[in-house]
Image (cartoon, grey):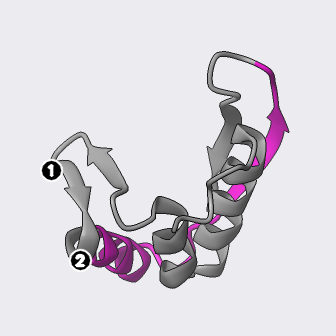
Amino acid sequence: MNAAAGRSAAEVARAYFDAQNRHDIDGLMTLFGEDGACTDPDMGPISGEELRQFFAGSFEAFPDISFEVDEFFEGRAGAPRRSGV
């Protein structure tokens, strides 16, 4: 089961960025669920252990990275506006 099921797009986005800021790989993987995938511009679609390693490598390469969600707006996907710090 994935932690995103039954939640609004804004709730999932907030949980995603909160997990990113904590460098919580298990929390991120739970949001994606067993069948979830992410598409990286350079790597294409990644999932499973490859996605876990992607997050681990990102946190190692950028140990001080954090994200601040300025606001959520209603759109087709409820996408957040974000800025990396």
Where residue 39 appears, as percent x and y from the top left, is 28, 44
Helix, strand or loop for disc 1: loop
> In this view of the protein, which residue sits in the foreground, 50 or 61?
50
> In this view of the protein, which residue sits in the foreground, 80 or 33?
33
> In this view of the protein, which residue sits in the foreground, 40 or 77?
77
Where residue 76 appears, as percent x and y from the top left, is 64, 16
User: Residue at image x 81%, y 33%?
Assistant: 72
Q: According to the image, label 2 marks what residue? A: 49
Vertical comparison of 63 with 10: above or below: below
Mark 1 or 2, nearer chain start: 1
Disc 1 versus disc 2: nearer the observer: 2
Q: Does residue 42 appear to the left or right of 47 in the view shown?
A: left
User: Residue at image x 27%, y 46%?
Assistant: 40
Helix, strand or loop for disc 2: helix
Mark 1 touches mark 2? (CB < 8 Å): no
Q: Where is residue 71, by image quadrant?
A: top right
Where residue 15 appears, as percent x and y from the top left, is 70, 61
Q: Where is residue 73, by image quadrant?
A: top right
Spatial CA distance of label 1 from label 2 is 14 Å
Q: According to the image, label 1 marks what residue? A: 43
Residue 32: numbered disc? none
Where residue 66 appears, as percent x and y from the top left, is 63, 65
Q: Amino acid at mark 1?
A: Met
Q: Which residues are magenta?
A: 51-74
Q: Does residue 48 appear to the left or right of 16 in the view shown?
A: left
Quadrant occupied by the C terminus: bottom right
How many numbered dots are placed on residues in this image? 2
Q: Does residue 29 appear to the left or right of 69 in the view shown?
A: left
User: Counting other residues with Cα less than 10 Å from the Cα at mark 2, is it few (<14), some (14-19), or many (20 or more)?
Assistant: few
